[in-house]
Image (tube, coloured by chain):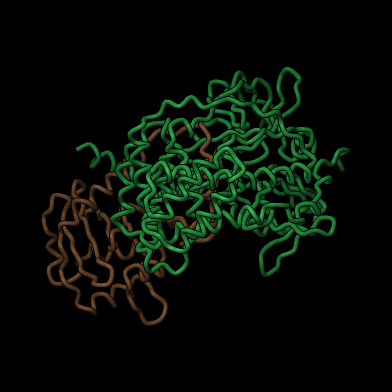
Amino acid sequence: MVPADQGGGLMRTDLLAETVDGVDEAMAAVDAFDKALVVGLLRPHAVLTTGLTELAGAVAGTPLAARVAEAAEKAAAGAASEDHFVALAAARTALVGSVHDALTARVEEATGRARAEESGAAPAGRQAGNLLAAARSWLSDLARGGWQGIDHEVVSGAAPVVSAMLPDPELRRAATVLDGFAAELAACCPGSTLERVPVRRWADLWSRAMILTVPGAADVPVTGTATGRLLPLGVDVQEHATAVQAQVHAVFEPADGAAPRLVRASVSVPKPDTVVGAGLWQLLRPHMSLLAAVSEGRSMDLTDMPLTAGGDLVWSDERARTGKPADAFATARVAMSTATAAATAPLDRHPARIAAPVFLEGYDAQQGDEGLTFTLAGHGLAVDTDRIPAAGPLTPEAVAASVACIGLLRWDAGAFTVQPLAVETLVRKKPAAIHAGAWAGGTSDKAGVKAEKAATDAGAVLRERAGRLLRK
Amino acid sequence: MARVIPPARPRKLAKVPFVELADGRLQGVVSSGSDIERVYVSSVGAGTFAYACSTNNNRPCGGARGGFCNHIRTLVNEAVLQYGAERVARYLRVETEGEPSAQTLTTSMTGARPPRGDTAAAAPVFSRFLRHLAYLELAPTTGPLPEMQWFPPTRAVA
């Protein structure tokens, strides 16, 4: 049966292939600054002068101009204070923010999707200042030494700060990025012998972390509540050695009949690095009933669930009840096409943050040397199959054989890509759905049960060791 | 965007609950085969292969007098399972003939007649292990962590 309204058919892949004005220019200034972070801001150097001048020049017409110009001048002389580093991080964040805005406008054009009104809620700002100051001091040390100057001594300075921050929910966001960043730097020590520096990535993480040391910057103000029906589309997982987050993308239909909205619900937890694969679901599962609903293909009914201006539900199980069966592909084909997207919170604007749910079908899937591509109306869209979590039934092969796909439209390395969340393949001419997050709430799949067993055993050993050794 | 370090590969943790490539060493914690309350802190230095093994109460391991004890050999095996032989070989700066494996790594390192290292590192390694275990005790949150977007999963293995 062919549904009457094929929302996904409207996707304008031609627009995604076209260049977006201004992006290259903004990123050139960002790249120039990022090179300065490679050599470090400890003493004057030609690379610093160029990078700082370009960064300051790029924000010269903005309210940041004066502060950034001063910071750039001090930094070029090797005399930047911690506040100057924050100003430089803010300038870089504003620039990539403008790139985010241009790309998001293009995504809206391509998907034909409207954006919800922005809301100007200001963060409250009541975080523990001394730990944030300690984090800022570590980040300043990193910037002075540059990526070429990292060694175990400098990098290990993050550990006590992170350990003190992690237990505090208000500081969890900053702690999590610092922890992942520090682990990555530690694995690359010493910087002097590093063959290839992930220049933009580390500058991104450094600036994100730096901005989060400003008290209040990490706050996510709740601006309303959600009462109505939640129709899950799929699950996106993110993990570093010592943290995991699952984000359920969904369409929310307000009970009051207002327009449906695209929302996310997240759950995250710190973890030992040996908890991997199905073990990640085991840690997250008990804290969000929505994961079970996703695995069972059900909707959930929400009552007064806190909702942020950025479209994030702040989940609590008490405010949700399991609802009727809801097929994600039906949601994607029908409900998603009329849903509006929330505006991204001001400080979160970054191309890496773009993850717009899309529905695609009628494409030609082709496996090339560069990976898988979906060709729609003559335009190719790269498919990022590497992001499919290992602990699930969806495989790159299934995506290559698919006829319909629910995915997240992303921007990576200068081009739009689609990350598959679920696909439909034809099994004996009948569509069969495979979801990346199918094991989130548990599974009876043979491979899944085996993965769960291995993860349960690993978790049991760690808990036994912790019980015996930790409280002595 | 791609992550710099691939995730650890799954392995059984009973014998070696903790292993890491850090501080210029392969280091970790090996459960005692005879006493459930006891663990050994074992390490091998990068480049020198200087080895050390002692209990968490700083008693020297009887097996690690003239060379690698069984705890250190087990540690190398588990490190190869967790990180892949390639990465372990690169970190420890071990040259092996052909493809590195746990066995060729150990043979190559013991063949270099490594010196006995300092057991003073045992205390910090053990405290890193406790810090690692403490991650199990942290509460989950349902507030969004936007920065996790920089840490996508990858199907690439270590």
Where residue B43 appears, x then y in whole percent? 24, 62
Where residue A450 appears, x then y in whole percent? 50, 50
Q: Quadrant of the rendered structure where residue A349 is?
A: top right
Residue A347 higher or lower than A20, as above or below: above
Q: Could you tell me which quadrant the N terminus of chain B lies in?
A: bottom right
Residue A130 higher or lower than A94, as above or below: above
Give the colour chain A carries in the figure: green
Closest to the observer, A227 or A394: A227
Closest to the observer, A42 or A285: A42
Which residue reaches farthest bottom? Answer: B97
Q: Quadrant of the rendered structure where residue A385 is?
A: bottom right
Counting every numbered tag in the picture gives: 0
Where residue B61 appears, x then y in whole percent? 14, 60
Residue A355 higher or lower than B93, as above or below: above
Q: Could you tell me which quadrant the C terminus of chain B lies in?
A: bottom left
Decide if residue B34 is on the left or right side of residue A129: left
Closest to the observer, A47 or A7: A47
Where residue A455 appears, x then y in whole percent? 44, 47
Is residue A446 at least partly visible in the picture? Answer: no
Is residue A247 at least partly visible in the picture? Answer: yes
Residue drawn at the location 53% of the way across and 21% of the way down: A318
Chain in brown (letter) = B
Decide if residue A418 is on the left or right side of residue A222: right
Residue A319 higher or lower than A98, as above or below: above
Residue drawn at the location 72% of the way across and 26% of the way down: A253
Residue drawn at the location 51% of the way across and 38% of the way down: B145
Decide if residue A329 is on the left or right side of residue A70: right
